[in-house]
């Protein structure tokens, strides 16, 4: 793991403040509601869904995996979708870590920044920014299953999942999950913002000041514990709640 000598702390803090200002400028050029963001802890991570990261997987194999998840996960879910609702089941499966052809995005760039700087202490993080693709229509959902989509679209699950709500989350669904999505480029705008590994702690502190930490992002007991652990390890007093 790379370390920063004590003699360099002041310089890192100065450059961290400058990088944060550059991040604000990055966002100032994307002020419309038509932008989505995704944070990753390593710049080498492509915009490729988990199901396709080890090569091509047939849609039949994807279906078998999802059907197995439906059968085995249902007893542990308090609010499970209808058995035939593959769209909702795909969202639940993605939420719980099953490899799917979905990618997580958010309309809140600070949420994306949170994920970009949370781990990977020896790697630079990246915050992707893309203009929102077409929204999946209700007609698409009824007439076309998730494994028959031919274009990249935005999918917002109708099923309420607290963590997705707290993260202003949505998904892109990729018709060819083994291929990384190359979002359309816009002249004069960068497709992503890089946070160097040495600036991650500074970004964590600034985000926490703005109320963006594991407790608010994860919206569950595990998130509360993770946030309090972060405050403790950082030597900071945790925020008080009434």
Image (spheres, helix red, strand yellow):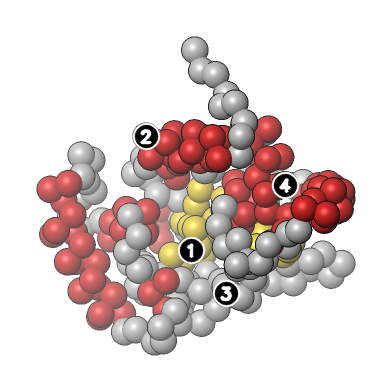
Q: Return the mark for residue 14.
A: none
* Numbered badge on residue 202: 4
Asked whether residue 29 appears in the rendered view, the answer is no
The answer to the question of whether label 4 and label 2 lie on touching residues, with beta carbons closer than 8 A, is no
Q: Which residue is mark 2?
A: 221
Query: Residue 216 at what x, y percent from top left?
Result: 51, 35
Q: Is residue 204 above or below residue 19?
A: above
Of callouts 2 and 1, which one flags the residue occurring earlier in the amino acid sequence? Answer: 1
Q: Nearer the viewer, mark 3 or mark 2?
A: 2
Give the residue number, with chain letter if any, for mark 3: 46
Q: Residue at x 52, y 69 (%)?
A: 152
Badges 3 and 1: C-beta atoms under 8 Å apart?
A: no
* Mark 4: secondary structure: helix
Question: Marks 4 and 1: in contact by CB < 8 Å?
Answer: no
Which element type, helix, strand or loop, lies under badge 1?
Answer: strand
Give the labeled residue for mark 1: 103
Q: CA distance from mark 4 to mark 2?
A: 25 Å
Residue located at (82% from left, 56% from top) = 8
For residue 181, above or below residue 35: below
Question: Marks 3 and 4, Cα distance to the nearest angstrom?
Answer: 25 Å
Distance in Å between CA atoms under marks 1 and 4: 27 Å
Marks 2 and 1, Cα distance to the nearest angstrom?
A: 24 Å
Drawn side of residue 227 relative to residue 236, left or right: left
């Amino acid at each position: 793991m790379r370390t920063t000598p004590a003699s360099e702390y002041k310089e890192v803090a100065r450059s961290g403040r400058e990088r944060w200002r550059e991040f604000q400028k990055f966002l100032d050029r994307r002020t419309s509601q038509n932008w989505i963001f995704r944070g990753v802890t390593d710049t080498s991570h492509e915009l490729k869904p988990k199901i396709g990261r080890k090569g091509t997987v047939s849609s039949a194999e994807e279906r078998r995996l999802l059907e197995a998840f439906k059968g085995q996960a249902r007893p542990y879910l308090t609010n499970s979708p209808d058995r035939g609702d593959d769209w909702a089941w795909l969202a639940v499966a993605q939420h719980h870590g099953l490899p799917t052809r979905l990618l997580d995005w958010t309309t809140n760039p600070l949420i994306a920044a949170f994920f970009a700087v949370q781990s990977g202490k020896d790697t630079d993080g990246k915050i992707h920014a893309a203009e929102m693709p077409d929204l999946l229509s209700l007609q698409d959902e009824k007439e076309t299953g998730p494994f028959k989509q031919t274009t990249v679209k935005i999918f917002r699950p109708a099923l309420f999942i607290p963590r997705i709500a707290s993260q202003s989350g949505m998904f892109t669904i990729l018709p060819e999950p083994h291929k990384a999505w190359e979002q359309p480029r816009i002249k004069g705008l960068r497709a992503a913002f890089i946070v160097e590994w040495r600036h991650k702690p500074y970004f964590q502190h600034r985000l926490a000041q703005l109320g963006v930490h594991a407790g608010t992002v994860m919206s569950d007991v595990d998130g509360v514990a993770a946030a309090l652990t972060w405050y403790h390890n950082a030597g900071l007093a945790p925020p008080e709640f009434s």
